[in-house]
C-alpha cells in the first residue's frame, strides 16, 4: 500500500510543486541575468534583491481580469492554455533525478516511474503540446495570434524531426529507450554521451531552443511583427499558464539533455576512483546542477543573439539540422555495427 | 475484471469521439475530437501492454499528422457550410455501402478467429530471443515481417516523391 500508492503520490506532489516553484524562479533568474547582461540591476524592490518578485507576479496575474473575446471560440479558447500546460508537466513522470536511494529505511527511487519506452514517451507527449499554441491562435479569432500560431506550428513540426533524429542516434549508442538505462549505459561505458555524440548534443540543444520557442527562434512571440504572439488575446492566469508551460518545457529540455548527454545523476568522471570524494554531493544535486547549467545557457543565448528571420529559421531547420542529424545517425549506426 | 471495465470505458470513449468527429459541424472541433480519439486508441494499446505502439500512436498520429490536418483546416477557411450535392441520397447510399463492406470484413475476421483461434501470446513471445516491448517489436519487424515492413517503407517513399513532384511543377 505504502510502496505502491503513497510513495508515488508523494513523489508526484513533490516533483510538480518543485517544478512550479522552479518555473516562477526561472522567470526571476531570466530577468536578473538579462539585466546583468545589459548593465542593469533587474527587479530589486520586492524583498532583498527582488527575490520575492515571483510571489508578487503570481498574485498580480491571479487577481487580474480574465477576458474572453466576444468572437472567440470559447471552449477551445479555455482549453488551449490547459493543453499547453498539461504535457509540459506530465513529462516529468519519466525524468530520473537520481538512482535508488535509502530514505527512512526504505529504498526509494528518485524518479516517478521508469518505463521501457521512456524517451519515446517524452517525445510523444511533447508533440501534443503543440496543440496549445495552435489552438490559442485559432480560438482567439484575431489575425495576429493566428499568424503567430501558424508560424509556431510550422516551426515546431520542422524542428521536431531534427530533435527526434538526434535522439535516435543516442538510443543507438545506449541500446535502450528507458531514461534510467541510458544513464546506466553512460555509467558502464565510463563516458558521457556528450563526448560520444557531440554533433547530436549540439543539434539537440539548438532544436530544444526552437521547440521551446526561445530566442533566437522566438518568432511565435515576435512583438514587433505580431503585437505579442499567439497569446495576444489572453490575460490574467490563462496568459500565465502559457508562460508556465514555456518555462516548464525549458526545464524538460534541460533535464533530457542532462540525462542523455551529461550522464544524468552521475558525478563527473564516475569511473575514476580517486575522484570518489565528489560523491559527498548527492546524485540529485549533480542532476540539478547540470540542468541548471542548461537553463542558464538558455537565458545567456537569449541575452546574446538576435532573432532569426522566418526564412532563415526554416532554412536552418530543413537544410542544416536535419541533414546533419541524418548523417550523424548513419555514421553512428555504421560505427556501432563495426564495433560490435 | 478491472481490465474489462477499463477496456469497455476506453472503447466507449473511442466510439463516442469517432461519432463526434463525423457529426460536428465546425471542422476545427472535428479535428480536435480526432486527436482525442487517437489518444484513447493509444490508451487501448497501453491496456494491451503495447507501450511502444501507444507512444508511436501519440507521436505520429496525435502529435504529427493531425497537426498537419489542423494546419490545412486553419489555412483553408471552412466557415461556409458545404453545398448540398445534386442527389441528396448519394452520400447516404455510398456511406451505407462502405459501412456494409467494413461490417462484412469485421464479420469475416471474427468468424475466422472463431474457426482458427490465434496462438496464445505467451507462446509466441517465448520464441523470441529478446525481451522488452521495443526489442520484441524490432525483432519481429526485421525477421518475420521484414517484407511487409520494407514494402510499407517503399510505399511511403513513393508517396513522398509523388508529393514533392506534385507540389513543385518545375524541378
Image (tube, grey):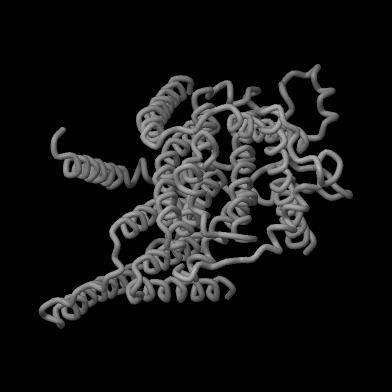
Rendering quarter of residue A182: top right
- The residue drawn where x is 43% and y is 59% is A142
Residue B158: image location, x then y, percent: 21, 42
Residue A340: image location, x then y, percent: 48, 23
Can residue B124 be spotted in the picture? no
- The residue drawn where x is 68% and y is 42% is A96
Residue A222: image location, x then y, percent: 49, 42
Q: Nearer the viewer, residue A149 or A128?
A: A149
Q: Is residue A228 left or right of residue B61?
A: right
Q: Identify the image quadrant of the N terminus of chain A.
A: bottom right
- The residue drawn where x is 70% and y is 62% is A62
Q: Is residue B153 above or below residue A72?
A: above
Q: Is residue B50 left or right of residue A194?
A: left
Can residue A130 be spotted in the picture? yes
Residue B45: image location, x then y, percent: 47, 60
- The residue drawn where x is 75% and y is 58% is A59
Rendering quarter of residue A38: top right
Amino acid at each position: 500500500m505504502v510502496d505502491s500508492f503513497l510513495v508515488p503520490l508523494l513523489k508526484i506532489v513533490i516533483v510538480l510543486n518543485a517544478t512550479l516553484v522552479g518555473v516562477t524562479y526561472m522567470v526571476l533568474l531570466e530577468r536578473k541575468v538579462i539585466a546583468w547582461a545589459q548593465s542593469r540591476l533587474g527587479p530589486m524592490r520586492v524583498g532583498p534583491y527582488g527575490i520575492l518578485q515571483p510571489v508578487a507576479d503570481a498574485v498580480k496575474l491571479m487577481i487580474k481580469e480574465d477576458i474572453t473575446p466576444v468572437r472567440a471560440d470559447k471552449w477551445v479558447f479555455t482549453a488551449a492554455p490547459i493543453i499547453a500546460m498539461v504535457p509540459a508537466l506530465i513529462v516529468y513522470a519519466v525524468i530520473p533525478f537520481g538512482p535508488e536511494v535509502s530514505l527512512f529505511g526504505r529504498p526509494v527511487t528518485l524518479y516517478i516511474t521508469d518505463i521501457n519506452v521512456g524517451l519515446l514517451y517524452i517525445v510523444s507527449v511533447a508533440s501534443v503540446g503543440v496543440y496549445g499554441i495552435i489552438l490559442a491562435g485559432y480560438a482567439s479569432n484575431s489575425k495576429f495570434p493566428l499568424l503567430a500560431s501558424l508560424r509556431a506550428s510550422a516551426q515546431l513540426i520542422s524542428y521536431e524531426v531534427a530533435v527526434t533524429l538526434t535522439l535516435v542516434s543516442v538510443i543507438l549508442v545506449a541500446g535502450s529507450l528507458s531514461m534510467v538505462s541510458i544513464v546506466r549505459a553512460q555509467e558502464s561505458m565510463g563516458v558521457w554521451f556528450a563526448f560520444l555524440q557531440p554533433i547530436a548534443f549540439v543539434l539537440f540543444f539548438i532544436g530544444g531552443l526552437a521547440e521551446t520557442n526561445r530566442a533566437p527562434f522566438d518568432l511565435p512571440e515576435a512583438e514587433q511583427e505580431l503585437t505579442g504572439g499567439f497569446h495576444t488575446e489572453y490575460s490574467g492566469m490563462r496568459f500565465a499558464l502559457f508562460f508556465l508551460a514555456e518555462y516548464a518545457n525549458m526545464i524538460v529540455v534541460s533535464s533530457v539533455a542532462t540525462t542523455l548527454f551529461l550522464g544524468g545523476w552521475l558525478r563527473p568522471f564516475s569511473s575514476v576512483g580517486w575522484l570518489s570524494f565528489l560523491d559527498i554531493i548527492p546524485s540529485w544535486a549533480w542532476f540539478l546542477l547540470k540542468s541548471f547549467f542548461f537553463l542558464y545557457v538558455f537565458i545567456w543565448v537569449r541575452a546574446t543573439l538576435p532573432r532569426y528571420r522566418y526564412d532563415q529559421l526554416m532554412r536552418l531547420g530543413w537544410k542544416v539540422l536535419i541533414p546533419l542529424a541524418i548523417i550523424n545517425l548513419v555514421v553512428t549506426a555504421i560505427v556501432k555495427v563495426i564495433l560490435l | 475484471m478491472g481490465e474489462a471495465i477499463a477496456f469497455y470505458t476506453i472503447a466507449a470513449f473511442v466510439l463516442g469521439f469517432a461519432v463526434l468527429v463525423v457529426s460536428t459541424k465546425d471542422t476545427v472541433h472535428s479535428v480536435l475530437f480526432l486527436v482525442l480519439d487517437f489518444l484513447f486508441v493509444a490508451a487501448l494499446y497501453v491496456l494491451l501492454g503495447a507501450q511502444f505502439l501507444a507512444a508511436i500512436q501519440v507521436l505520429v498520429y496525435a502529435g504529427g499528422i493531425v497537426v498537419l490536418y489542423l494546419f490545412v483546416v486553419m489555412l483553408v477557411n471552412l466557415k461556409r457550410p458545404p453545398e448540398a450535392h445534386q442527389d441528396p441520397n448519394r452520400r447516404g447510399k455510398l456511406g451505407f455501402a462502405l459501412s456494409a463492406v467494413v461490417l462484412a470484413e469485421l464479420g469475416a475476421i471474427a468468424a475466422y478467429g472463431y474457426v482458427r483461434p490465434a496462438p496464445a501470446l505467451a507462446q509466441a513471445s517465448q520464441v523470441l530471443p529478446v525481451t522488452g516491448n521495443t526489442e520484441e517489436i524490432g525483432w519481429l519487424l526485421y525477421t518475420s515481417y521484414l517484407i511487409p515492413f520494407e514494402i510499407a517503407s517503399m510505399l511511403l517513399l513513393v508517396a513522398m516523391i509523388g508529393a514533392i513532384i506534385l507540389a513543385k511543377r518545375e524541378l
